[in-house]
Amino acid sequence: VQLQASGGGLVQAGGSLRLSCAASGRTFSSYYMGWFRQAPGKEREFVAAISWNGGITYYADSVKGRFTISRDDAKKVEYLQMNSLKPEDTAVYYCARREGNTIGVISTPANYDYWGRGTLVTVSS
């Protein structure tokens, strides 16, 4: 499975961006998708995830109410709509995928099987 993230860029504080993550290769019909981010000098942190059937979404407290994760199973694409962006949202954003319908702690990077290369989001003040 290969993941390709896109949609990053430079935006002013208060602006919006939509990230996409396209999956290719042999994929399961049930899977979890997540977004993580890593700012310079910091560890990778959980941002959002969506359950194997798309029925449940999870968010870090820092993005709750501003970011929305969604998925289009037919297109094998996951999205992260980011609104009201803040300078502290600046980071490289990575999409991740866990095949199947079980996962441990959804916010733990090690529980994901595949990762995209990342897309840079820069929010200016």
Image (cartoon, rainbow, N blue to C red):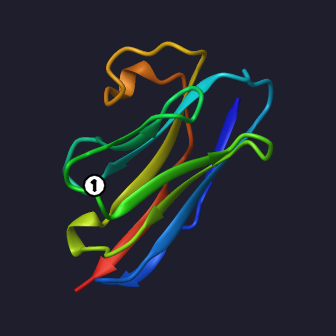
At x 43%, y 77%, the residue is: 16
In the rendered image, the vertical position of residue 53 relative to residue 72, given as above or below: above
Horizontal relation, residue 5 to residue 46: left or right: right
At x 20%, y 49%, the residue is: 61
Nearest the camera: 119 or 40? 119
The quadrant in which the N terminus is found is top right
Label 1 Cα neighbours within 10 Å, binned few <14 / some 14-19 / many ≥20: few
Horizontal relation, residue 46 to residue 75: left or right: left
Horizontal relation, residue 37 to residue 101: left or right: left
Residue for badge 1: 64
Locate residue 86: give its quadrant: bottom left
Residue pushed farthest front? Answer: 55
Locate residue 12: give its quadrant: bottom left
The image shows residue 8 at horizontal and vertical percentages of 51, 68
At x 32%, y 77%, the residue is: 123
Amino acid type assigned to the residue bearing label 1 in the image: Lys
In the rendered image, the vertical position of residue 17 relative to residue 74, given as above or below: below
In the rendered image, the vertical position of residue 22 relative to residue 58, given as above or below: below
Nearest the camera: 55 or 116? 55
The image shows residue 117 at horizontal and vertical percentages of 54, 47
Q: For the image shown, how many numbered marks are present on the structure? A: 1
In the rendered image, the vertical position of residue 71 relative to residue 121, given as above or below: above
The quadrant in which the C terminus is found is bottom left
At x 27%, y 55%, the residue is: 64
Q: What element carries label 1?
A: loop
The image shows residue 48 at horizontal and vertical percentages of 38, 44
The image shows residue 62 at horizontal and vertical percentages of 20, 55
Locate residue 19: give its quadrant: bottom right
